[in-house]
Amino acid sequence: MDKLILERSFLIDCKNKIMQGQSIRSLAEEVHIDRKTLRKNILAILSDEEKEEFQRVLSNHFRKNRKSAKTIKKEQREENYKEAIEKLIQLGIRKEDIETIFENININQHTTMAKDTFAMKLVEIFDFVTERNDGMKPGDEGYITKQDVIQMILRDSRFMTNDVERKLKPMCEIFDNWSPNISKDQVNRYIVKYPRILKNSIKKLKMHLIIGDNFLVKVGNRYMSLSEYILTENPFLISENSQRFLEGVCNLRDAHMSGVIPAEELEKRIEPSDWAWQKYKLPEYTDDDSFRREIKDIINGIDKENERKKGEEI
């Protein structure tokens, strides 16, 4: 910039405007000069007393214009909410549905969310469902519609609290790959019908399915593994205490003297008052392979003990 502009009259004019409330930044931008340079030159023409007053005004301007961390965070949350809502609308989700879901989850203290967190979580869930629909088209039996998702959340608001990357995707991967007899279409129908199944831990799910691999269930004229039965017919068995589940299915098998359990007995199973608690003691889960071996050893070990007792009776 031409040095003539920085003559005393110009600097005094700038100083007066700043004292009246204009920011030094805006003045510097008007004449295309660096803010620090302008400040330095103004201070150079002032008396000590004027410098003190000028510095005080500059400090007040700075505090007034500076955004607090709280304000910045609030603005960011509002921006996140706005972007999420725009994306939901682009996905075809109606504003009234978004509002209904938000009101519904905030009724329960365990699912209460800030509006930006809620909106971003909802986007994640619809993105997850889009992935689940990959390779399918609307009208296919396993296609999850937007209305399906809305009803899943309204039926069970805790569905919204599931972490997509750490919970929903890994659990669905287990459902998809546990048995070649269960298709992705079936899994999609399953999670739409029973969204509460996803509230169980991944560890508990694996434990019950591994136990279930050791038994057969008779459903009408059909036979399937207990794990397949859980994944297609009775997901509520996963919610049962793991020790009780192991003990219960083992006792039913013992009662029938075979590894085949009638489905209706699983449905109405009630714990007998004289159960020998922990006859089949649940091993600690560390990994799939170890747990699978220990479960098999426990079941086979009791079988051998029963055979030994029969031999002694003969």
Image (cartoon, rainbow, N blue to C red):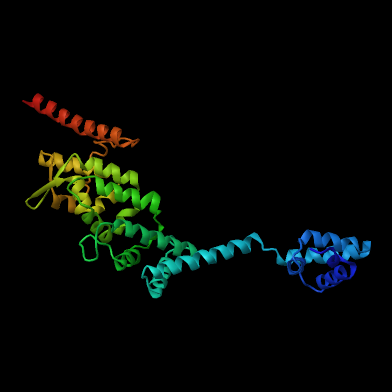
Q: Is residue 268 visible?
A: no
Quadrant for the N terminus in the image? bottom right
Query: In the picture shown, does residue 307 fall above or below 113?
Result: above
List x then y, in percent, for residue 215: 17, 41
Residue 278: horizontal and vertical position, in percent?
Answer: 27, 37
Nearer to me, 32 or 303: 32
Name the one closer to the observer, 28 or 99: 28
Q: Quadrant of the C terminus?
A: top left
**Which one is nearer the viewer's eye here, 290 or 110?**
290
Residue 168 image offset from top left, x and y in percent: 35, 53
Q: Is residue 14 left or right of residue 206?
A: right
Q: Is residue 83 left or right of residue 273?
A: right
Judged left or right of residue 243, residue 308 is: left
The quadrant holding residue 154 is: bottom left
Looking at the image, which residue is at 82% across and 73% down?
A: 17
Residue at 16%, 31% in the rendered image: 303
Which picture quadrant has residue 39?
Answer: bottom right
Q: Nearer the viewer, residue 308 or 87?
A: 87
Q: Position of residue 145 (x, y in %)?
A: 28, 65
